[in-house]
Image: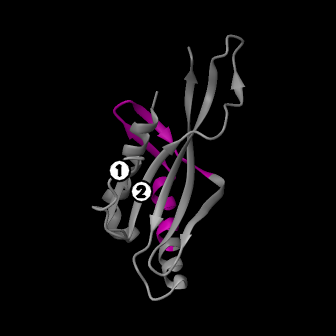
Amino acid sequence: MITPDIAAAAVREVLHTNRASIGIKDAEVLSEDTDSKPLRPPYAGVIADFEDESLQATDDTVQIDVPVEIKILCSSGEHKNASLAFQEAFGIAIKVITHAKTTLTTDDGEFTLMLRKRPFTIIRNAADQCVIQANLYYYIGAIGE
């Protein structure tokens, strides 16, 4: 089973390796207690989360194909106006999706990141920083066996 922390770390590694072509300075896994001060914009921050329920279960309530959300915050640098910041963050988000939407290999196995039908969420849109969230997911095989 590929746990969310392992998946987030694998995505972070892909983004970090390709940071020059994506146009970011940093890529990190984020959590509630992450110190964001060391992150230099523009950056990509990876978050693992659970939002949707599994659509399948066995008679003994084993949940099958549990969706794990992988959200990637794509932050622009500071600009003179919000439009320029948005353009930078959106360009980063497009490149992040291109690099992350793939099959990734970890020590625990492989998993495939897929793009949500709503691929983007605008978190913040201002001249000093625009943050666009790229929405991807993968499935954990079975929980509760």
Residue at numbered disc 1: 34
Q: Give the x, y percent position of residue 19.
A: 34, 64
Q: Do the residues labelled 1 and 2 touch (CB within 8 Å)?
A: yes
Q: Which residue lies furthest to the bottom in this view?
A: 80
Comparing 22 with 26, the one in front is 26
Magenta stretch contains residue 68? no
Residue at far top of view: 60
Task: Check the image and report above or below for 69 versus 99.
Answer: above
* Depicted 101 relative to depicted 107: above or below: below
Q: Is mark 2 on a helix, strand or loop?
A: strand
Which residue is identified by label 2? 45
Q: Residue at x 40, y 76 (%)?
A: 77
Image x and y of residue 34, in percent = 35, 50
The amino acid type of the residue labelled 2 equals: Gly
Vertical comparison of 53 with 9: above or below: above
Above or below, 127 against 23 in this view is below
- Place residue 6 in its image quadrant: top left
Label 2 crowding class (10 Å Cα cut-off): few <14, some 14-19, many 20+? many
The structure residue drawn at horizontal position 56% and vertical position 50%, both measured from the top left corner, is: 136
Residue 29 or residue 109, whichever sits in front: 29
**Disc 1 residue type?**
Thr
Q: Is 116 on the left or on the right of 97, as rendered? A: right
Looking at the image, which is closer to me, 132 or 141?
132
| Residue 62: mark | none
Q: In the image, is 9 to the left or to the right of 82?
A: left
Tell which of 114 and 12 is nearer to you: 12
Magenta stretch in the rendered image: 91-115
Disc 1/disc 2 C-alpha distance (Å): 10 Å
Q: Closer to the camera: disc 1 or disc 2?
A: 1
- Residue at 46%, 37% in the rendered image: 4
